[in-house]
């Protein structure tokens, strides 16, 4: 599974054990308020039942045991089939759209499986320093934990699609905006070093760091807000072909989209439904827009006389101009994240926060909330960087087509998981994730 | 909902209360062995989650309360939406294929709903003799109980599709065959009175009884067995267009059918999976074939040089030649059913029984197991009888197209629910119900 | 191809040669006004390009030559592939929906093929009396000519779908109604002999004649008119679920049907487009309704408080009560058809004629225009008669499912081709043929 | 239609008239060998009937007359509907997939329309110097001619799909290879000016020219050949998921692709069908591969241990390193194209030519046949260049999603139409155009 082994910094066994426990526990916290019924239902083809995530993330670690623990016997052949997601290299698997058609393994059985894998992994980790391939294994474990954090975010999306305001978890109130943020910043072009070049963990698709040449550009200081998007709707933006790509125009006709996902029209007024209930769109006017597809994001930008930024433009604006070493960890170091600077999962708001709520987290260029709140669509196709080398089979490379890059993480992203070089990707018609945008402009 | 009110015999209030309790309790017995997860999963578009059946059968009684209990307030608007099946007259409803996309109401909430409806119904029934429309109401209650028995049978199908040999309910062993049954009986044609003319409960689609003229014909003494159908498979019957209707030939190509549902090919041998486990087809050779579509049933008959009977032929063969009053209740009276005569749900075999297991239940013409074991496909289109009058809106009449009649009930049919005049109906490509056949022949 | 050989009356070789020439020539007359472009275009999946009909009807005769002319070599392997319609027994073939994706063979090449087959057939027919299997061959030739007449009617449908009022053929004006026809006739039930028992040509699906028992019934004296159907439309019949089968309700929603095929809404008024141009529905109010599906026909009947007749009811009403020999040829003998009695293809109206236009053609019961004008939907499923024996492989028997019987022929049916026992059949959602209805009622 | 007017060099009226006549005549030469039937058939959803191209290219000029010729009346409202392709701004239009369902207007009528538009255009062009908006109009006329040249190429694709080796046009024999071409060239990275900056005609999507930064890379000296691709097929490349994007793996499974379009397996040997007949793949081993999708192109490259070039890499390799002014016209000036240097439409080979056939046309870096023969897939998403300004509504900008850039033109591209900066684009699953590839590599 590992084609190229990277030397890893985290060789301290205690640290990896602690991280393992912490990440695995966080998954369980997310699902804790669910009823048994909630674990097994699949609301749409692109969604997965929560119980599946619990099993699949454990399956990932079981594949490590299968590869590196001599004499390991599979926990259950059925589980290997059911909990594989899309890896051709690991044999046949359940069709994605059918994940919600099976009631077994039960939640209890899945949790037993999960516990058993945890036991075995912790035993395995104890012996790890003696293992001849400890570097490869450490890499895979870190990968498995990053993978699990990705699924934590997906769990939030899936639970939102399933329950939304019926979810019974604790939600911490969002902070008030500390200042008003508006307008654009102008950023000089020229050569820019795009991608990850640090020594911590990063996905292969963020590497290698390499020179690109940028033109001068301007970028919004804040993400596009619900209020701005409501203007687009009221200006009949969904009814005017001029703002839309041809493919997008077809999608909104076929799906009959008239607003972002989770917006509902009640007696002529737009309402946004989220984990904390129903809100008038007006009352959320100063919050970042979310749950729009790439088609809607680019239509809005065109209507506003702007455009989406490329991912290089976004990354440049997010990072320090003077200190390239800060690229990888913006605006914090690898370890010490200060939750007062961005709205990430650990803040437990389960929601976007008002624009201007995190003034200390702004980039040197003055852009707010680039990290956290909402993933921001860029105009960049999801392609390999020049010099790309796949480090993990079938993880990132087989998706390098038909998708767009999103940047910056959302309120559902664990803080350890995000970087300013992080490249997320979705198809242009998808909008069940926490996706918004920020506009750019040629100058 | 009732367009024509029928005078009812069962005016004894105590009896209806007892029947209500008994039928409602039987539904709960079927689901008792399920895990919570099993209640909410939908395995295919044509299936429903067991929790939905619990709610829907209660919803039926709630519509009675809504119509006849003055001042009644709906238990929950959401439940009205979710638990309606297909009644346009009762407002909007959840799309059938989406019944498995909701985890709420939970099983517990659904059971509370069910209990509350039972409480209210029992109170309502106590006051019933005083009600000005007691006849209409009694009819609806009986209808609701028949409806519930239909759903008990559907529950068995759905649980089989979901769990099959993983279902943990108690299964009573099937009796041994008492005699060998083979060959055909010859039955004289002439005028025959088709349909229900008794004074008990029967659906509007079984009425009115009316004259039809039959040609002489022969009918198999026993249902087609797994052994006979295995011969058809081995003779490459699924690969020879000559036996198939054009539409059927397309269906088996598209669905890649090579055998009945629940037959699996293990190392070159056909295996049948049922509630009690996996069995070689050979070991089940003397049992009635089940889970075939109309296409497969008619292809087999053509291959065998025979044909399917019409429903009139079937009914004539099932009933007494001398005593037309016995038509309606074959071979028992309305009330006293003797479980030694047919394999119905109360026998709790959860399976077909060997051919020849119920010699006392044979018809006067010598046909065995016409009632119970498997529903038998007839060649008759599901159409209204001449003089048909709809008694219940949207219950039977809106389905009078594109379906075929099946007769006789199955091991999953409650004994009170079945009659020799009962007309069940499915589309020709359906086979998830317990459907088999018996061949006829011109003479 | 012939499973059972019928002794034939037409042994006069000159007569069969003359019939062959006449029928083949009539096909060419229909297509004569077409432009080359019209011959090759397929307007919908269920349609065929006219050039395909020319080739396919010739292919039919080529299969006769292949079977009975020793040493015969196929004209072209490609043509065998392209011009086969659906006969599995004759090898692979072009998918129906793709008939319009080929420009070759050209029209000229197809006509050469047709001419060559005609030459060979006429030579073959000359030698026929000497042939050992002349009876079988004569049957097939007659069948081939009946087949060709079926395709003549299909050609009219296809040309209407393609060109409608742009078709440049000569159209003879329709006669004026000779009398006003309204109301219903009452017809006594009892035993009735259904099906063909004469000695002329009839399809296997019309045989054997057999007893059926009918209840008393009433039948409309005239087909339902455009004016009556317009009332149904204006009464919002397409918007009221109560009149529709569940399947029909889905079809009209999906297809967005609001009126019969070829009805167009121009500035709030319904217009009917036919071969002679555009007409207000009002101006056609007294003409038989056409181009409705079974769903629309039965919805109308239900709305009108009536029902569709069974095919046995229809046939009884169409035939003489006293003279069963007239059943087969109603109301004329096999040969001498008097075009003043019914609106059939030879009248060259290319349209329905007003109700009451053919008083001499009324049946003994007083029903008008049962033959000609429009095919009439019956409520009968298309199934084999008791005692049915297939005479021709894959011609009628593989369609005995999912279709309804229509009776009586239309203005596009050649007179030699129609009989009162003739059973036409289409799926309930089809309406591109000239299909109307006449209502019945229980009495 | 013109949002930004560009000053044009071609103000000589005689020259534009001559160009108009020449381009319009060339379209007619392509269709001259067709039969009438060939003009109206649509072979697949993505294809158009040739008669439609004749009308559509004329419709384009009619929109110019409508905008700039005062008092102009539409030739036919029906034609406006039928011959519009996808321009929302020009009102409703025929669905693309239905272009083959109409036989009218006939070919003759379409040619009359075409002639009439030519007459009117030539009159209009005579008066053009006096027109107040002559610059805008000249731009639109040039655009109309470029548009027509695009459709000339599409006509070749459509005729190939329809007729292939049945096309009766004259085909000039391909030249023999002048030298053996193999291996890769290494090209230094650094800043590169991408895009068009000349003063001739270029599409808005080629502009503005702008700096990009390239890494060092290597590029194949020749396009991938049929022989090389045959090795990939024989190495079971279509059966190994490791070479494929996930989306591509699904496409080849669904479409059952085992080789490029127009490759056929005859008795175990691969045959390529083209305009000149059937050829063994071996006999075509030294010719550029064509008719592969992006999925197949990138799978091949991955299997070969290489990758596809970006469009910037491709353009740099195609152009002179020393003389940036030659970028736009490679390797000839705007007017004087020397047909000995590249295989373009005017060579009339109707086919690719052997690798090495055009040594004089090689780029300064030593890459052969970059212009002509086959369009080469690049890994670049089809997106606007930084600073892009739309010059023509709905022409290029509404397609900036879900497509990949191809470069260099093919044997079906008119020489006037191609430039080394030209950006063609197709979806990754398309392969009906003349599409091949050339591999790159990181160094």
Image: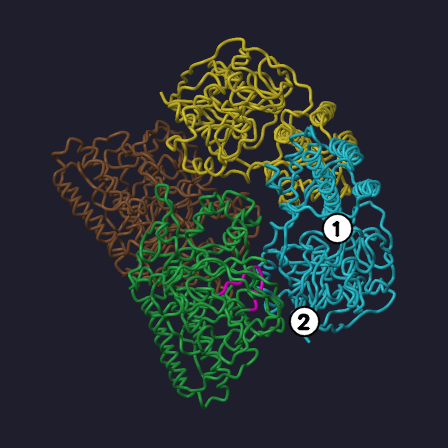
Chain colours: A brown, B green, C cyan, D yellow
- Which residue is at the front of the view, A165 or B308? B308
- The reply, left or right, for residue A224 in relation to residue D128 is left
Is D191 included in the stretch rendered in magenta? no
Point out the image quarter for the C terminus of chain D: top left
| Alpha-carbon span between mark 2 and mark 1 | 35 Å
Q: Is residue D151 visible?
A: no
Image coordinates for residue A238, horizontal then vertical, percent: 53, 52
Chain letter, disc 1 residue = C
Neighbours of disc 1 within 10 Å: few (<14), some (14-19), many (20+) = some
> In terms of image quadrants, where is residue C422?
bottom right
Indicate the secondary structure of the residue bearing disc 2: loop
Image coordinates for residue C428, horizontal then vertical, percent: 63, 57
Q: Which residue reaches farthest bottom?
A: B130
Q: Is residue D328 visible?
A: yes
> In terms of image quadrants, where is residue B50?
bottom left
Indicate the secondary structure of the residue bearing disc 1: loop
Residue at image mark 1: C201
Chain letter, disc 2 residue = C
- Which residue is at the front of the view, B383 or D359? B383
Q: Which residue reaches farthest top?
A: D178
Q: Nearer the viewer, mark 2 or mark 1?
A: 1
The mark nearer the N terminus, 2 or 1, is 1
Query: Above or below — where is D123 with respect to B44?
Result: above
- Which residue is at the front of the view, B345 or A52? B345
Is B404 included in the stretch rendered in magenta? yes
- The reply, left or right, for residue A97 in relation to residue D327 is left
What residue span does the magenta drawing correspond to? B397-407
- The reply, left or right, for residue A119 in relation to residue C23 is left
Point out the image quarter for the N terminus of chain D: top right
Neighbours of disc 2 within 10 Å: few (<14), some (14-19), many (20+) = some
Residue at image mark 2: C306
Image coordinates for residue C392, horizontal then vertical, percent: 65, 46
């Amino acid at each position: 599974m590992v084609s190229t082994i990277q030397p890893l910094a985290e060789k301290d066994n205690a640290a990896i054990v602690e991280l393992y426990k912490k990440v695995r526990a966080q998954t369980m916290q997310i699902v804790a308020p669910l009823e048994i019924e909630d674990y097994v239902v699949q609301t749409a083809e692109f969604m997965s039942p929560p119980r599946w995530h619990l099993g699949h993330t454990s399956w990932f670690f079981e594949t490590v045991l299968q590869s590196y623990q001599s004499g390991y016997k599979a926990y259950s052949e059925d589980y290997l089939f059911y909990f594989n997601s899309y890896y051709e290299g690991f044999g046949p698997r359940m069709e994605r759209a059918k994940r919600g058609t099976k009631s077994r393994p039960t939640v209890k059985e899945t949790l037993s499986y999960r516990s058993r894998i945890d036991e075995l992994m912790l035993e395995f980790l104890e012996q790890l320093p003696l293992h001849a391939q400890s570097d490869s294994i450490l890499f895979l474990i870190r990968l498995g934990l990053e993978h699990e954090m990705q699924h934590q975010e997906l769990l939030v999306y899936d639970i939102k699609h399933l329950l939304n305001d019926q979810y019974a978890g604790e939600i911490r109130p969002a902070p008030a905006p500390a200042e008003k943020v508006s307008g654009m910043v102008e950023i000089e072009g020229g050569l820019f070093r795009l991608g990850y070049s640090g020594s911590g963990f990063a996905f292969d698709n963020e590497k290698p760091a390499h020179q690109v040449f940028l033109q001068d550009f301007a970028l919004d200081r804040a993400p596009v807000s619900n209020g701005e998007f409501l203007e687009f709707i009221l200006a009949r933006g969904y009814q005017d072909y001029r703002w839309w790509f041809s493919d997008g125009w077809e999608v909104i006709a076929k799906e009959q989209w008239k607003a972002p996902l989770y917006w509902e029209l009640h007696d002529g007024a737009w309402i946004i439904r989220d984990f904390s209930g129903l809100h008038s769109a007006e009352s959320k006017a100063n919050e970042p827009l979310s749950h729009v597809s790439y088609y809607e994001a680019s239509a809005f930008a065109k209507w506003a006389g702007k455009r989406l930024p490329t991912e290089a433009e976004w990354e440049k604006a997010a990072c320090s101009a003077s200190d390239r070493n800060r690229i990888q960890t913006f605006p914090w170091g690898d370890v010490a994240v200060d939750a007062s600077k961005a709205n990430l999962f650990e803040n437990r708001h389960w929601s976007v926060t008002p624009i201007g709520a995190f003034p200390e987290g702004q980039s040197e260029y003055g852009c707010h909330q680039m990290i956290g709140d909402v993933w921001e669509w860029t105009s960049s196709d999801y392609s390999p960087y020049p010099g790309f080398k796949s480090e993990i089979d079938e993880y990132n490379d087989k998706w390098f087509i038909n998708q767009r890059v999103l940047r910056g993480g959302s309120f559902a992203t664990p803080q350890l998981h995000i970087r300013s070089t992080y490249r997320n990707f979705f198809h242009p018609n998808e909008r069940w994730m926490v996706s918004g945008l920020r506009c750019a402009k040629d100058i």
